[in-house]
Image (cartoon, helix red, strand yellow):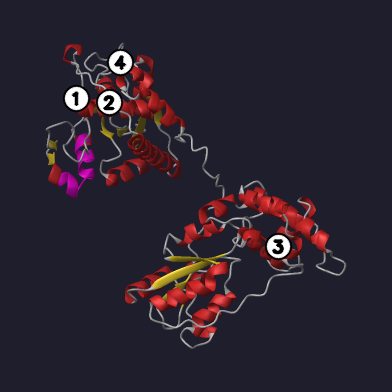
Amino acid sequence: MSKPFEYFVVFAEMRTGSNFLEASLNEFPDLHCYGEAYNPHFVGHHNKDALFGVDMAQREISPLSLIERMKENTDGFPGFRFFNDHDPRVMAHVLADPKCAKIILTRNPLDSYVSLKIAAQTGQWKLSDMKQRRSATVEFDREEFEQHLAAKKLFQLDILKGMQVSGQTGFYVAYEDIGDVDVINGMARFIGSQEQINSTPNSVKKQNPSGLEDKVTNYTQMVKDLAGIDHFSLSDTPNFEPRRGPGVPGFYLAAEAPILFIPVAAAPKQSVLGWLADIDGVTEEHLHTNLSQKSLRQWKRGNPGHRSFTVIRHPLERAHRVFCEYIVPKREDNFADPRKVMRNKYGISVPGQGDLEGYTKLEHRAAFANFLEFLKGNLAGQTSVRIDAVWATQSALLQGAAGVVLPDVILREGEISAGLVALAQSLGLEAGALEVEPEAGPFALADIYDKELEKLSMAAYRKDYINFGFGAWDEG
């Protein structure tokens, strides 16, 4: 039977017990861990500049050749330790390689942070004899720890994503468990070893066995600071929206001026297109659209100093416009089915045949409130209806566009005129007048607005309120 794996990698960080784990794995006759094979300062272990004839210069040119040399020169399974500051080309390769067994070693980030500071202060990174132990106390620095924590979280997320997209799984082990011989034996079996060991090695000792109170000089302040650090991302805005493509074919270039307009669905567009055409004294038919990513890149390269902008709308007003244009009237396009589902399953009582005769302001307000409640669930992935671009968050739409181009100006609807004047002046151009877009009906938002609608809008579009700093609609 063929082996599922040909080699292994231990994803770890400094001060997570990876030296001890390496020593444990090397106790198995058919496993050999070659240290930090891709450390930027050495190859494998401290003061070593080559491994299996591959030196640092060769490793830089052809990083994967070192893995091949390991496999060629090892009787059994070769492996190495990999940290977040090692060669990203290698990380991408091993994450995608189903022949590589992934071991993910983790440790409480506070413990690893304190241990790292002690090691840096004492210069002792590995301990083999307690008689040689050097002790020290360190000061907790909140900003420094937050940076440490963010780097660790990002590394772990990258590992997780890499295995998810390639359909693989890894062997997760915590610092507290690496001394458990049964866990180590299970890890060896996961890699493919046919051997077992009776105990973990004594060659590597725990360097700082005392509690944090004895190691941190400002322990009380540290406890207070930790209370304000959102380690579990409790304050993050949940995001269940699908990732959006950049939507390049829907972008617009001015006829001559080096200006790119990135429309946001259901935000001001028609009036902006009129302004964009007017700046060159042409009609809208002369604007360039239906672009490709290639043609957009060519345009950017050929127009140094170009400007790009987008216009966003208050979430409540945008939702009301979508409601009036796509849900209230009966349509025969791809909104017909969503509208039907909204009426039948979500209590959005708009006229079935789109006949507005007898449709009152109170009915409109009630139906719109139900639409906002529907949007909250829809954007959270809790309905069977697609998350259409016209009611997707503006944040998600612009994040999609950011994969190709970042608008250097984001204008709110109420600031378009002044913003476009400034944009034109930055290019030495004169801006024409901007036409006001008519409000969607059958009733104006001002006629039905109340704080309850605002509350429902904030619940559905919390991400946009936070990202763009929107306040209540009636506050301007």
Q: Which residue occupies the foreground of this view, 170 or 349?
A: 349
Dot label at residue 138: 2
Amino acid at pointer 3: Phe
Q: Is residue 385 visible?
A: yes
Amino acid at pointer 2: Val
- Residue 58 x %, y %: 14, 46
Q: Are marks 2 and 4 in contact (CB under 8 Å)?
A: no
Q: Residue at x 12, y 41 (%)?
A: 55
The answer to whether residue 289 is left or right of residue 369 is left
Q: Are marks 1 and 2 in contact (CB under 8 Å)?
A: no
Q: Nearer the viewer, mark 1 or mark 2?
A: 2
Among the two numbered marks 4 and 1 on one chain, the one whose residue lies closer to the N terminus: 1
Magenta-highlighted stretch: main secondary structure? Answer: helix
**Which residue matches tag 3?**
323
Question: Callout 4: 10 Å neighbours few (<14), some, many (20+)?
Answer: few
Start-end of magenta stretch: 58-70
Magenta-colored stretch includes residue 431: no
Amino acid at pointer 4: Pro
Dot label at residue 122: 1
> Which element carries disc 3, helix, strand or loop?
helix
Picture layout, residue 468 above or below residue 429? above
Amino acid at pointer 1: Thr
Q: Which residue occupies the foreground of this view, 198 or 337?
A: 337
C-alpha distance separating marks 3 and 1 = 65 Å
C-alpha distance separating marks 3 and 4 = 63 Å
**Which residue matches tag 4?**
209
C-alpha distance separating marks 2 and 4 = 15 Å
Q: Which residue occupies the foreground of this view, 23 or 404?
A: 404
Among the two numbered marks 3 and 1 on one chain, the one whose residue lies closer to the N terminus: 1
Q: Is residue 374 visible?
A: no
